[in-house]
Image (spheres, helix red, strand yellow):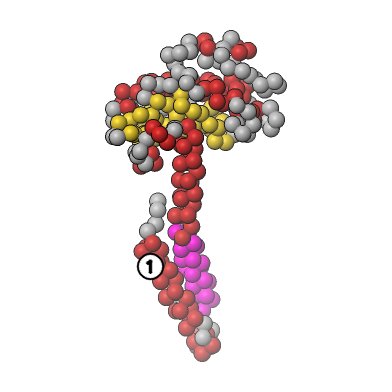
Amino acid sequence: MKIDPVTIQRLQDQVGKYLEWLKRWLEPANLARLRPKLEFQTGILAGFALIASVLLGVTNCSTEGTIQRRLDEDLIKSLEEVVPAALHDNDMLQDTLTIPSAEYNIGANETTVYLAKKSGQVSAVCFKFTAPDGYSGAINMIMGIDREGNILGVRVLNHKETPGLGDKIEVTKSDWILKFVGRSLDNLTPAQWAVKKDGGEFDQFAGATITPRKSVQAINRGLQLFKAHQAQLINP
């Protein structure tokens, strides 16, 4: 949830009032009057606990907007890598649909799909998905698909695969992930959606077959998700 500047300012003003009250409460004359009372120790603890809670809340509110902006910036960068700018004139972050995806084993029961539109018409879609069964854990990816079901691009967002072996799924380590551009469920048979060791179309890595195998399988399942909801997505 984003906190608007007016709310943040109101909270900061409230903190200022509490600090002013604490300053008066801690004046020597006031403390001398309160010290003999049983409520004194309780008041000290309660006062500092209250101030600490308010300060923590204000700090959280102040940084929350910055964190969200950073997350949005990272997502925009990822979208730009898999959906060419020429294909849309809308704000994809604000133009989304949520579709059920539990049966596709891509890491989520529901998937947010970002719509790329040109002159109001959907030209492509993009969504994040996961290969949950990589060699060292989940492989999180993002994929852009045009309205006909052809892959525009795939990128790995994060993973824990073996450095020097499985990490060749990263575009900065090899061009392997670029081989999916233009691929679809229509121009490859189900059997071809596999690594060559399994009789498919895509290379495996020397010493690391599981990583590319599970990535290919997850990308294929992502395409199946798109196909199942294609009519809804391209004509929202």
Residue toward you, 135 or 50: 135
In this picture, residue 145 sits left or right of residue 133: left
Question: Can you identify the residue that label 1 sits on?
Answer: 10
Which contiguous range is marked in magenta? 38-61
- Front residue (pair 199, 21): 199
At x 44%, y 55%, the residue is 65
The answer to whether 36 appears left or right of 233 in the picture is right
The residue type indicated by label 1 comes to Arg
Q: Residue at x 47, y 46 (%)?
A: 73
Percent position of residue 125, x then y: 39, 30
Above or below for 213 versus 1: above
SS at badge 1: helix
Residue 148's x, y, as percent? 37, 21
Position of residue 59 in the picture relative to residue 231 (left or right): right
Instruction: Point out the image quarter for the C terminus.
Output: top left
Asked if residue 44 is among those painted magenta in the image, a careful observer would answer yes
Q: How many marks?
A: 1
